[in-house]
Image (cartoon, helix red, strand yellow):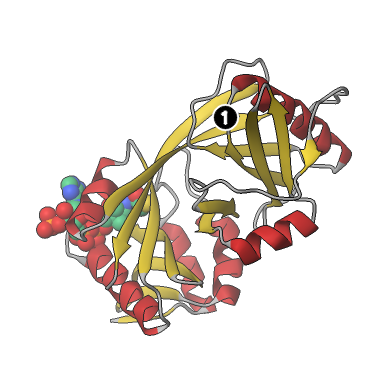
Amino acid sequence: MIRNAEPSDKLHVLKFCQNTFSWGDYVEHVWDFWLNEDLFFVFEKELPVGIIHSFFSKDQIWIEGIRVDPNHRKQKIAYDLVTHVELVGKSKGAVFSFMLVDVENSISLSLAKSLKYELFQTWNFYALEPKKNSNFNVEFSRSFDENSATHYVKSWRWLPFDDAVKSQLIQENKIIQSQINGKISTAIISNSEHFDNTLIVTLFSESDDATLQIILFLQNYAIENNHNRIQILTKEKLFDFESLEKKLSFHLLRKNLG
Ligand SMILES: CC(C)(COP(=O)(O)OP(=O)(O)OC[C@H]1O[C@@H](n2cnc3c(N)ncnc32)[C@H](O)[C@@H]1OP(=O)(O)O)[C@@H](O)C(=O)NCCC(=O)NCCS
């Protein structure tokens, strides 16, 4: 009943995904990417009635895009899809499985609980408007030793942040830091792979003063690099700032597959 997704599933799936959330859904925008990336599964009952996409990296399997047709819910379809992906992940050597759930999505939080996921971290999502600025006190990092930085966000996936990844990001000038009065804030920048002109930023904030410098830099960087959206993900609560809007909070949930 669970099989790889195929191009011909698209129409059926997008039909039951039209009104997933109050604002619609993003599945139609990522469908082609997910097909190309593999690990994209469909639950079939004559027609597709559920989907899940996953992404393997290092020791973890990332789970995203769980959707079940509203006419087929509460039949353990999501439960079976997640369990399937966990087994696939385990067979590839994953030790952990991760998923991100909106703190207000109580049904998905129940689903995760029933599958024995634990609350690992909580992250806040802010939208920042690009703006021409000058005079910001930041530098490209040459070393970044922050033990609490377990993951960084790439295309809305929380990926393991190890030494090899750090070196590469440092080389590419993707790690920006600001130090003020001994407190350092750090931002890791990346382009969205799925949405045009969107800058995705993982922010580790030690102080508001240092973070303000990074925010001014990011606004200007977006203008100079033709990004019209800046999405900031951070574990911290940020200060009030005119071009910064708090959107949502998410729980990062983890399961040890051992
Ligand atoms: C969340 C969603 C995928 C669940 O799919 P589903 O196939 O109906 O879920 P399952 O039947 O596998 O449920 C497994 C467990 O999840 C929880 N759960 C599922 N639906 C629930 C509901 N309506 N209320 C409370 N708990 C619920 C229960 O713990 C359930 O176990 P139980 O049946 O033993 O009580 C589905 O509601 C959906 O597509 N929602 C919209 C998209 C979405 O929010 N996706 C997740 C984004 S992270």
Residue drawn at 23 percent across, 65 percent down = 79
Q: Is residue 69 visible?
A: no
Q: Which residue is mark 1?
A: 206
When the figure is inspected, residue 3 is found, relative to residue 212, above or below; the finding is: below
Which of the pair 149/217 is nearer the observer? Answer: 149
Can you tell which quarter of the image residue 187 is in? Answer: top right
Residue drawn at 48 percent across, 45 percent down = 148
The location of residue 84, given as percent across then percent down, is 30, 76
The location of residue 20, given as percent across then percent down, is 39, 48
Number of marks present in the image shown: 1
Q: Secondary structure at mark 1?
A: loop
The location of residue 109, given as percent across then percent down, is 26, 47
Q: Is residue 28 visible?
A: yes
Q: What's under tag 1, amino acid-wise? A: Glu
Residue drawn at 70 percent across, 61 percent down = 167
Residue drawn at 47 percent across, 60 percent down = 14
Q: Residues within 10 Å of mark 1 (few under 14, many from 20)?
A: some
Q: Quarter containing ligand 1?
A: bottom left
| Image-based side of 200 in relation to 161, left or right | right
